[in-house]
Image (cartoon, grey):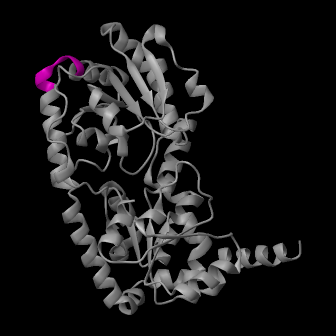
Amino acid sequence: MQLVDYFLKTGYEISFVATATEDEHSSALEKLGIRTKQVVLNCDTFKDFLVDLQPTIVLFDRYLTEEQFGWRVAEYTPEALRILDTEDLHSLRHVREQCFRQQIAFSVNVWLQDDKTKREIASIFRCDLSLIISDFEMNLLSTVLGENRNIVHHLPFMVDTAEVPTETPSFEERTNFLFIGGGKHAPNIDAIKHLKNDIWPKIRKQLPKAKMNIYGAYLPQKIQELNDTAVGFYVRGKAETVSDVMQKAKVCLAPLRFGAGIKGKLLHAMQYGTPSVTTEIGAEGMYGQLAWNGSIADGETDFVNAAISLYSDKTTWEKAQRNGYRLLSDRYEKSVLEQEFSFIIKELINGLEGHRRQNFIGGLLQHQTLKSTKYMGKWIQEKNKMK
């Protein structure tokens, strides 16, 4: 939605194309003046739509979308600037989860050998520009991009700091702990179970009146069943507004043990003046050389102690809150990030032919002998006609 807002503000007409159907959680895009269209996989209707539209820029939501639709865009609208929004590196999140489940150490070499990594990096090479949300992931990609680093751009979440509340509830006005995260995201499910089984009992022992509130849409039954009022562990479900629940909480806990990208829950915590305790994975790529909005702790004991300290000590809490505000202004200021993004887009549109000429590997991956996704799609399309 931040990218949608950016392109609307800079005068672009937007067409939002998806294979999914709308539901009650869908954003009201048409009210923003955005044309929406549902398309079918492996079907020429998307080609016809492209030829009619002749877009200036095509932005793919994650590499799976580029795999499905990228070859049609390259073939039928070759002059369109192709941008991949990675959201986070899906392959990195996947490999970390596999390593966690198998109890083996994550390494760059393990990541590089995974099939999802090869597919995602191939997608990055095929596009003219890929948006990378984390500076950690930018550094990770430098190991494989080499001289092609100009095909990636670091673009984290963009925050209009002028809209960040200047007055939020004080230390004395807040109470309890909070975790927030969607139930369809495996790192969140693991973190909630880790909280309930390992971390919360130790916190509750020292803070017997405190409560742990769990918020998130689509929380599965197994998570809802963790609700236990006897020990102050409340599974609340979807929050009406993030701002409301975040500003009521004294401390945000995010004991994430695998994942990738940067975490919206932790950015929201900074925006609403709520200090947080998270892991190295949780804070990864979010703070650079600046002080964190609370504490970063991987060990269970360290995590518990940090949570109790933040919850109990006003001076520590207020210092953490100030750290969060500084992080927002120094690393996530919307106007600065949008200006940088605008410059990159202008440069690419004006020099697209030369830019693509320098990306030899990208051109190689567009070669017909390597376009398995294209021909698989065509095969499925022909097969469907026979039904």
Pick whichever, 309 or 269, lies toward us: 269
Q: Outermost residue toward the right?
A: 387
- Above or below, comparing residue 249 to residue 68 in the picture: above
Horizontal relation, residue 287 to residue 108: left or right: left
In the displayed orientation, state which residue is furthest to the bottom.
353
Residue placed most toward the observer, 370 or 267 = 267
Residue 342 is situated, as x and y percent measured from the top left of the image, at 27, 75
Name the quarter where the N terminus is drawn: bottom left
Question: Is residue 142 or residue 194 the one in the foreground?
Answer: 194
Judged by its main secondary structure, the magenta piece is: helix
Q: Is residue 324 visible?
A: yes
- Rendered location of residue 40, percent (x, y): 68, 69
The residue depicted at 56 percent of the width and 27 percent of the height is 223
At 70% from the left and 73% from the top, the residue drawn is 42
Residue 260: say if magenta.
Answer: no
Q: Is residue 255 left or right of residue 329?
A: right
Query: For the point 35% across and 60% down, which residue is it?
Result: 2
Q: Position of residue 247 (x, y in %)?
A: 27, 32
Residue 255 visible in the displayed image? no
In the displayed structure, 249 sits above or below 381; it is above
Q: Quadrant of the C terminus?
A: bottom right
Q: Position of residue 304 (x, y in %)?
A: 32, 20
* Figure check: 67 above or below 190: below
**Membership of 315 in magenta stretch:** yes
- Which residues are the magenta region? 311-316
